[in-house]
Amino acid sequence: MVSSFLERDVEVSILLPPASAATVPYPVLYLNDGQDLERLGLQATLDALYNRNAIRPFVLVAPHANEQRVQEYGTAASADFNGRGSLAGAYSAFVLNELLPFAQANYQASAKPEEAVMAGFSLGGLSAFDLVWHHPDYFMRAGVFSGSFWWRQRAVGAGYTPADRIMHGLVRAGQLHPDHRFWLQTGTLDERGDRNENGVIDSIEDCLDLIEELRNSGLNTQQSLRYVQVEGGHHHPDTWGRVMPDFLIWAFGPEAAAQQLPAPLPIVRLSFDPTLAPSIMPSSSPGPAVLLPLDLPAPDTSIGQPVTAAPVFTPQSAPAPMSITRPAEGDFLPYAGGYINQIPIEANPLDALRSQPAEIHAVFANLKEEQAEKAYAEGKWTLKEMLLHQIDSERVFAYRALRFARADAQDLPGFEQDDYVANSGANARAIASLLAEYDATRAATLALFGSFTEEQLNRRGTANGGPVTVRALLFIIPGHEQHHLTIIRERYLPIL
């Protein structure tokens, strides 16, 4: 269809209910990122749910995003601090004034707001929530998979505070509709970022904070909210596709089927010190729910191998606090402090080195070569270039650690990262080749740092014109990678 608001052709995927379904007009699901239906394995999921009468017949209307995704998705009231989401208002107008009438006129989609659901993934999930929150006269329910609720007015490090998160502010300033219903999902491996170092990754904390804002606005979290936290879940279509049955049964299941859903995790903060933040649930809420196994369809192997989740430590099985102390001021150049601070207090940097490969592989799983050769903006690195930059940097940092641990007193020069990337030839290589080199580099790094004694960790030298200890380099390597993983989540994944 042609959109006058977006000034482009918009491809729309339509999935109709079984031919035997007779009730019309149909309930309808409007789903952002329609280009990813195959990666989600959605048709197989729908077939399985229809075959066991777990859901009512409904129409799925899924507009495709294009290279303007990072501009069209977001919050209609405001772009983020980097100017992303500048077309979100136009996208909202497209959905309300063109997409809904198109579906209602051509596919017997219901025009009743209580029969319409809007959903999406990551930045598309933020867009879906924004639309439902502000337009309950068009749809009452929202589904958000790993929503980009970090969307903010100010960059971290530029005076940012939690009050800068845009969607949270819109909820505070807005009005809850009594029929609003929300299904929200996060994964414990959505990312590793922890801005305030309280032990809760940002994607989970941003979602829980939004739930608190909803509760403060009057939402009954027992009746009108379902929050599903997927242990080992990644920020990836593999996870979203496998948890899709839970969402669809919540949205379109008969009442009896919805009651049989496994209980979601209790809505609590998972900080090291629970007294640092108020409980989201009222004190009169029931005790922790029993987490039952969720019957999920097997991943569709036709679109690539499923992502293998990294081990997730529960509070009962978590290792003891690290014995490796953090580097002190004067053990590194000031710029490196930003990398070191990426490793939470009391965290073991060796554990970060061991867990990060699963995140890197999850980013590239099922990506086509040309997708990994795409930059998020003109003049920026591609994902392949960023990965090879990470490999190069890790080798340089590990080499410095080796020299200094062996009491080598020679000053070591710095390196110009942009020159390295420009001469790397990363885009001419296959993803599999780069990942194999990354894995080999990480294995060597772990073996090297695992061999150092306390005395060797405390040795120091001069690199890039300033002091650095072996201990600081042990923190800098995973911190540098975490820095780039955050960039991937915030700038690359929204356009992929």
Image: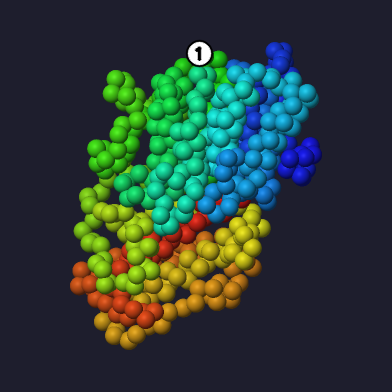
Q: Residue furthest bottom?
A: 410
Bin the neighbour count of mark 1 within 10 Å (Cα to Cα): few under 14, some 14-19, many 20 and up. Answer: few
**Quick one: quadrant of the N terminus?**
top right
Where in the figure is residue 368, as x and y percent of width and height? Answer: 64, 54
For image coordinates 37% across by 50% down, the residue present is 194
Q: Front-most of 480 and 449?
A: 480
Nearer-the-camera pick, 487 or 290: 487
Which residue corresponds to mark 1?
256
The image shows residue 437, relative to residue 140, as above or below, that is below
**Which residue is rendered at x = 56% and y = 25% of the image?**
141
Q: Is residue 473 visible?
A: yes
399 with respect to 183 (left or right): left
Relative height, residue 131 to residue 301 (above, below): above
Classify residue 384 by image quadrant.
Answer: bottom right
Residue 433 in view of the camera: no
Type of colouring: rainbow
Q: Residue at x 27, y 72 (%)?
A: 331
Residue type marked 1? Ala
Q: Residue 97: x percent and y percent?
A: 72, 31
Q: Secondary structure at mark 1?
A: helix
Q: Nearer the viewer, residue 410 or 105?
A: 105
Q: How many marks?
A: 1
Please provide percent x and percent y for residue 252.
Answer: 58, 21
Q: Is residue 27 left or right of residue 415?
A: right
Residue 74, image quadrant: top right
Q: As drawn, is 111 to the left or to the right of 243? A: right
> Measuring 48% from the left and 33% from the top, which residue is drawn there?
173
Q: Which quadrant holds residue 327? A: bottom left
Q: Percent x, y for residue 272?
A: 26, 43
**Relative to 101, is 260 above or below?**
above
